[in-house]
Image: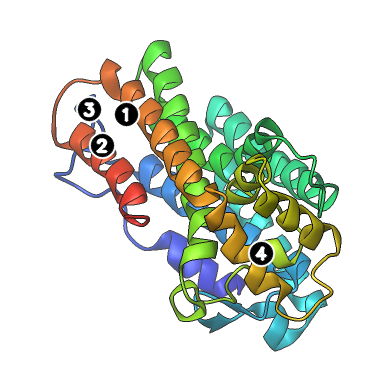
Amino acid sequence: MAAGAEAKFQRGGPTEGRSCAPWGVDLTTEHRRLAEITEMIHTASLVHDDVLDECDTRRGAATINSMYGTKVAVLAGDYLFAQSSWFLANLDNLEVIKLISQVIADFANGEISQASSLFDTSITLEQYKDKSFYKTASLIAASCRSAAVFSGANEEEKLAMYNYGKHLGLAFQVVDDILDFTQTAEQLGKPQGQDLASGNLTAPVIFALQHGSPASTELLDIINSEFLEEDSLKRALSLVDQCGGLETSRALAREEADVALRCLDVLSEGPSKTSLQQMVDYVLDRIY
């Protein structure tokens, strides 16, 4: 694993002739290394997620814990976090080190928040968004601001990029949670409704429970029973849609996406800004 990571991070220097940001700065070694570190942290979090959620598959492939056991999976995730921290320190930029280091702490906060609220039907939308920030949006926000740091952006631009990443990340998480209800196991690469089955109540469920109809009451009873009855999960998935949970969640995703787009107003027009705008469209395209 060490040799593989070393090979990945040592090949090639700066990429020439490409602009990485609307500040007219070419893509540097620091930008590229930041992207690699971000992906390492993301991968590490997924490895640990699969352990906590006891997942056998992710994106259609067997998880590390299903192939090698929990101990190896935990150590593999720890190794990736450690390697990312080493490469992060070597960026030699205190602002970026603080930003990305906070992300790892946020991951832990998100997992604790999720574990402590399983099957908690009183969870609020704000609590859900806080958890989604810790588990998803924090990494995207910190990465966007860090890229702006290496591009020589001013404070207003760095703050705008952080907020862009935050709201893009929240939109992405809401979309992901919608797809858990609307896509098949083959499309998801994991069982449909896995979050709901494990007691992780996401935006569609929260909105459905607020519907105030007999159907939402039935959904509440099913969740409180923790899906003991046969086919109760299938019924719950249907009720979430029936109570408008999916439609309202789509509106929430659009709302977060619109905030992300407005954050880009501080940037000058150009191919890089267009790419950031298209990233928002890409996230939303998955649910339409």
Residue position marked by numbered label 4 in the rendering: 236
Q: Residues within 10 Å of mark 4 (few under 14, many from 20)?
A: many
Q: Residues within 10 Å of mark 2 (few under 14, many from 20)?
A: some
Q: Secondary structure at mark 1?
A: helix
Q: Amino acid at mark 3?
A: Pro
Out of 93 and 209, give the one closest to the viewer.
Answer: 209
Of the residues under marks 1 and 3, which one precedes in the sequence?
3
Out of 11 and 198, give the one closest to the viewer.
Answer: 198
Residue position marked by numbered label 2 in the rendering: 277
Give the residue displayed 45% in from the left and 19% down from the top.
159
Give the residue displayed 65% in from the left and 35% down from the top.
125
Percent coordinates x, y for residue 190 in the rendering: 57, 76
Q: Secondary structure at mark 3?
A: loop
Q: Nearer the viewer, mark 1 or mark 3?
A: 1
Give the residue displayed 52% in from the left and 73% down from the top.
4
Colour setup of the view: rainbow
What's the distance in space between the residues labelled 4 and 3, CA to CA?
A: 46 Å
What's the distance in space between the residues labelled 1 and 3, CA to CA?
A: 15 Å
Percent coordinates x, y for residue 86 in the rendering: 62, 50
Instruction: Identify the disc placed on residue 219.
Output: none
**Are the residues flagged by discs 1 and 2 in contact, CB closer than 8 Å?**
yes
Q: Amino acid at mark 1?
A: Leu
What's the distance in space between the residues labelled 4 and 1, CA to CA?
A: 34 Å
What's the distance in space between the residues labelled 2 and 4, CA to CA?
A: 35 Å
What's the distance in space between the residues labelled 1 and 2, CA to CA?
A: 6 Å
Residue position marked by numbered label 1 in the rendering: 261
Of the residues under marks 2 and 4, which one precedes in the sequence?
4
Of the residues under marks 4 and 1, which one precedes in the sequence?
4
Residue position marked by numbered label 3 in the rendering: 22
